Image (tube, rainbow, N blue to C red):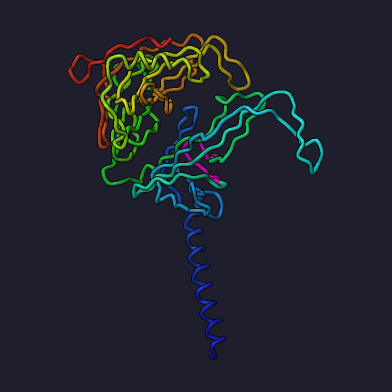
Amino acid sequence: MNAWGKLRHWTFLVGYCIFNAIFAFHAHAIDETVRAVVTQSDGAVMSGDLRMIGPRPLTLVPSGQDRQQMFLFSDIVSIDQQIETSSMERPWTFKEAGKEEKVYSDGQYPLLNFKTLVTLVNGTVVTGHVISVVMTLKSDQGQQKLFLHRQIKGTLEQQLGDVVFVSNIRMTANTLAGGGSIKGSVDGFGSLVSVTAFDNERQQILTTQVTKDNRFDFGTVLPGTYDLCVLTDTHVLTGHSDVTPHDIAGDKLMEGDLAAINLKFPLADDFFNDRWILRLRGTRGFAKALVYKRRSEYYESEKWTPGGFLWHLEIWSWHFADPDWKIDRRYILIRHKQQGGEKDRKLMYGKTLDAVTPGSTLHIQAGTGQDEEWHFIRDLK
């Protein structure tokens, strides 16, 4: 075989190997199914077998790069969709084809752009923008499609708060060293509705499904600590610890800090006019304000729901930049659409829900023991 023949031979072999490697990677992605818990922005939680649709794995363009990166589900612990920008826009069309001049119509529609955070089993977090992610989730309720969007354009009838999207996906079988499950039961506080957890290290909200016998199980969560929040048909029980992300330094909170934050609090843009800061914990570098807010009306199934109201329990993070306090982010612990005639909940704080670590099994019950004291904060009405 001459030199040219050898070159063609090796070129063929290299190309064949690369093709097979890519084909095997794609085939693996197509067949890859994992157990997952999916949380939507309105608080709805689903669990089941998650699978990609299409010939390639999860693909995104990492921030600051111009290349695509692919991830197998088996290498992922969690996927978070965060709003990058949001606005209300007017509908428009081009006045003439091929020209830039626009003609605007009446009304407004919500426009949201997202960034995606992928947490891998080695602890790495990759942030970027997803590309055409379509999945199926198969559960006891059947099979449904799920989408991770780069952008959502709503309808003229919607406001920003009406747009629902997938906010978090957790692969419950994948874990890091030091991770584990957080599970438990609730007794003496009515029927369990939902449980959420604030990840003190990564500043994320986790949700989980509950059972009819008042039990919950987050499955595998990442190493760290979690402040839990429990919603029943009669109570809201919450932890609210001083634990903050390890990489955010800050002095201890001082007397007068809550009053100073309350001066800035009404200036923050929000869809809720009625809102209150109930507690403040953390440090001056990362202060965690427990916020209750409500509005008298909400839009659901193309109708205004009479007789009830919409309320949130949230964490707002602040930091002190001398001489003022600055708001950083907001995290929704509970988003509840309270129907007309529904009971008002009692909000209570309990230390047993503070800074819970993976591997914990909690028995949350009404009682007078030292570890089970509950401190009343206010009625949620």
Residue at the image position 39 percent from the left and 12 percent from the top: 345
Q: Residue furthest bottom?
A: 1
* Foreground residue among 175 and 34: 175
Q: Position of residue 226 (x, y in %)?
A: 31, 31
Q: Residue furthest right?
A: 96
Q: Position of residue 288 (x, y in %)?
A: 34, 24
Across the whole image, how many numbered discs are drawn on residues? 0
Q: Is residue 298 left or right of residue 259?
A: right
Q: Position of residue 376 (x, y in %)?
A: 30, 11
Examine the rendering and report whether any part of residue 301 can be seen. yes
> Which corner quadrant holds the C terminus?
top left
Query: As displayed, is residue 305 above or below residue 363?
Result: above
* Foreground residue among 375 and 250: 250
Magenta segment, which residues? 133-144
Residue at the image position 37 percent from the left and 20 percent from the top: 290
Q: Position of residue 207 (x, y in %)?
A: 40, 31
Query: As displayed, is residue 261 above or below residue 14?
Result: above
Residue at the image position 60 percent from the left and 24 percent from the top: 159
Query: As displayed, is residue 152 above or below residue 255?
Result: below
Examine the rendering and report whether any part of residue 214 can be seen. no
Considering the whole magenta stretch, tell me its main secondary structure: strand
Q: Residue furthest left?
A: 370
